[in-house]
Structure formats: C-alpha cells, structure tokens
C-alpha cells in the first residue's frame, strides 16, 4: 500500500529517462530532479547517467527513479521501460532506441519548434501523452539552457512533481556557482511549464513499446581471432547532425579572406575548399562553405575566424540541408537528415 507524500498524492514507482547528447545538460537535470524529490518532497530517489566519452556531442542517457518514502528503490539498472521520456534533441528521435520501452500510459516530451511533428513519434502508443516544447529557442531567448526549460515542461506534465520544489532545487544548484544565471533559469523553467503543447493525433501505436538495449557487435564468443576487423568502417557515412546542440556556424562569403584558419582548428575536417578560375587571380583555392554532415557545432571555427565571415547561429529545421556544401560530391546531399 502506498501513502500520500508530504507534498501530494502517492506516486508508486516512477521511472523517467532523459535522452540527450553531451552539452544539453541532461545529467544536471537528472541530478536536480532527484535531489528535489529526496531533499524537498520526502520521496525516495535514485539518479545516474550513462555516456561515452565525456565530450560535447556524445549520446547521454540519464535515469531518475522515484518512489514513495516507504518504498525502497532496489535497482540501479538503466530504466528500460520508463513512465516518461524527455528527448533533448529532435534528431535523436530518428533512432528507435530513443523511445524504446515507453509504457502505453506514459508521457513523451520532445523539443522542437512549433509545427514540427517527427514521423518517428507515430510508433508511440496512442494512449501516451506527447508534449512538444521548443526548449532550444526558449533557452536562447532567456539566456538559459534547454535543461531548465525541459525540467519545467516535465513538472508541467507530471502531477507527481511539485514544480516549486524542483525550481527551488534548480535555484539552489546555481546560486552556489553562477548566481547571475538564476533569474534566467527561473524564466526558462516557467516558460517550459507554460509552453508545453499537447500533440494529439500523432502517436498511433498500440501498447508498450518494446524495450531495446544496444549491445556490442562483437563479443568474446563471436569476435574474429587475432582482433581482425573484417568490416572496416569509413567515416564518409558518419552524420554528426545529432551532435550539434542547437547552434551551427554559418558562412558569409563576402567577408572571407580565405586565410584557412577555420580549417586548421576544425576537428572534423568539414570546411570545404574549391579551386576557382574566374576571380581576379585565376586558379586559386577558395573557402566554399561547410559540410554540415560532419560538423558537430563546436564553434571553434567561429571563434577563430578573424573577419567575422563565420557566425554562430541558431539552427532551424532544414537550415543545414539548405546551406550545406558537400565535401564529397559523389554522395551529394543524400546523407543529411535535418
Ligand atoms: S577563418 Fe574566416 S576568413 Fe579565414 S578562411 Fe575561414 S571563414 Fe574565411
Ligand atoms: S563548428 Fe566549425 S570547427 Fe566545429 S566542427 Fe563545425 S565547422 Fe568544424
């Protein structure tokens, strides 16, 4: 039997999974949520994140389990079948693992501009609540981070979460380190609560989504003898679109002096050059633009460009495909999904 908490009705066992990429603050959001639940709401809570190399752009999953104070949490395994999934970047929805295991009566929150309805959400059960919020734009406008907006949207969506407690924990976290960020985060959080849009008629699946956990391609029983790699990969097909955290460099040719500094600092070789023969000096090499398939949005090129020819701009749907200059002509524009 469950009992009411000091701050609201009993919650039973609530599993929340944040699907994100490094740099958007999913790990910090999970910490804040679990701390608020334990320290301010009298619940039991557990939180951990899993990620690869600790850098901007790598995949991050953050898990929060909450139970009533009289229900112990015995598991510290990943949450394969969550009640709620929060997706920090729209492009992650193209991978079925992102929404795997969502319960039929669950809640899915995704970030996207108004009107964007990812096809991938059709797989979600029609009985789920699907909520859209434009976390990146709100974060930019309020000079905050997407995680503050999405925490607000989460509190707006789940009655079990007391928004005042979560906001108080968010404030306490930043007061210690970046006090000037507190009013920005508060506005971002409140807008996340208020601006979540319930999307109806998009999800049309049935029942719980099957769970999925990516496994290693080769194990001890299947790896070829001698560490031979029979199918060597090639980064030509890598698409780093999902690595970008809402901003991309945009090239303005009129200010470029073709000095090559951007190319020197770019870690992913996505600056595209070409030989042109009709300028004042014939047959010269010119900077032509950026292949966004390989650009992770680190902004090193923007910070390095001495003339302002590269600027950091908020990425909107379709922008990368429109501005992209393919570095490999043979595979043209076929790889970009954004
Ligand atoms: S650093 Fe700036 S000016 Fe130099 S090549 Fe790159 S875009 Fe052009
Ligand atoms: S933001 Fe600039 S430096 Fe960074 S990956 Fe993209 S093109 Fe290269």
Image (cartoon, helix red, strand yellow):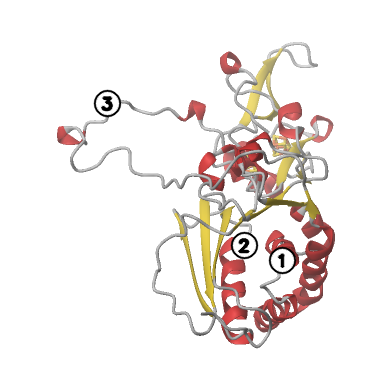
Of labels 2 and 3, earlier in sequence is 2
Q: Is residue 299 left or right of residue 164?
A: left
In front of the other: 171 or 264:
171
Q: Residue at 32% of width from left, 38% of height from top?
A: 217
Give the residue drawn at x 70%, y 61%: 150
Q: Quadrant of ligand 1?
A: top right
Considering every residue shown, the one lying at the far bottom of the view is: 6
Sequence-wise, the earlier of marks 2 and 1 is: 2
In front of the other: label 1 or label 3? 1
Q: Is residue 116 above or below residue 165?
A: above
Q: Is residue 162 left or right of residue 334?
A: right
> Which residue is under mark 3?
230
Q: Quadrant of the C terminus?
A: top right
Quadrant of the image occupied by residue 294: top right
Residue 271 vs residue 59, the one in the foreground: 59
Q: Secondary structure at mark 3?
A: loop
What residue is shown at x 72% (from left), y 39% (from top)?
202
Q: Which residue is mark 2?
A: 25
Q: Mark 1 vs mark 3: which is more N-terminal?
A: 1
Q: CA distance from mark 2 to mark 3?
A: 38 Å
- Residue 96 percent across, percent down from the top left: 53, 40
C-beta proximity under 8 Å, tags 2 and 1: yes
Q: Which residue is the site of mark 1? A: 148
SS of the residue under disc 1: helix
- Residues packed near mark 3 inside 10 Å, few (<14), some (14 to 19) or many (20 plus): few
Res 123 → quadrant: top right
Q: Is residue 73 left or right of residue 31?
A: left
* CB under 8 Å between discs 2 and 3: no
Image position of 59 with respect to 267: above or below:
below
Q: Does ligand 2 reach within 8 Å of label 1's beta carbon?
A: no
Q: Dot 1, how many residues are within 10 Å of its Cα: few (below 14), some (14-19), or many (20+)?
A: many
């Amino acid at each position: 039997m469950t009992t009411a908490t000091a701050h609201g009705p009993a919650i039973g066992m609530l599993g929340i999974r944040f699907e994100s990429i490094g740099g958007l603050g999913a790990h910090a959001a999970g910490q804040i949520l679990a701390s608020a639940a334990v320290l301010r709401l009298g619940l039991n809570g557990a939180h951990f994140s899993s990620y690869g190399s600790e850098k901007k752009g790598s995949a991050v999953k953050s898990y929060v389990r909450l139970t009533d104070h009289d229900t112990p949490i015995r598991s510290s395994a990943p949450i394969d079948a969550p009640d709620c999934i929060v997706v920090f970047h729209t492009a992650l929805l193209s991978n079925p693992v992102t929404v795997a295991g969502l319960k039929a009566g669950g809640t899915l929150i995704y970030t996207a501009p108004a009107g964007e309805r990812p096809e991938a959400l059709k797989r979600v059960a029609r009985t789920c609540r699907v909520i859209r919020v434009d976390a990146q734009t709100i974060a930019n406008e309020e000079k905050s981070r997407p995680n503050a907006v999405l925490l607000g949207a989460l509190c707006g969506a789940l009655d079990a979460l007391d928004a005042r407690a979560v906001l108080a924990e968010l404030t306490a976290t930043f007061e210690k380190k970046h006090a000037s960020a507190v009013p920005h985060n508060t506005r971002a959080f409140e807008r996340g609560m208020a601006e979540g849009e319930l999307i109806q008629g998009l999800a049309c699946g049935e029942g719980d989504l099957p769970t999925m956990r990516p496994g290693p391609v080769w194990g001890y029983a299947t790896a070829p003898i001698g560490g031979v790699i029979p199918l060597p990969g090639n980064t030509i097909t890598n698409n780093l679109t999902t690595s970008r955290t809402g901003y991309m460099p945009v090239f303005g040719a009129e200010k470029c002096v073709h000095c090559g500094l951007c190319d020197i600092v770019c870690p992913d070789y996505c600056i595209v050059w070409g030989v042109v023969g009709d300028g004042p000096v014939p047959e010269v090499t010119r900077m032509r633009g950026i292949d966004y398939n390989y650009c992770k949005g680190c902004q090193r090129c923007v910070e390095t460009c001495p003339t302002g020819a590269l600027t950091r701009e908020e990425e909107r749907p379709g922008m990368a495909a429109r501005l992209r200059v393919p570095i490999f002509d043979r595979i043209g524009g076929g790889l970009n999904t954004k």
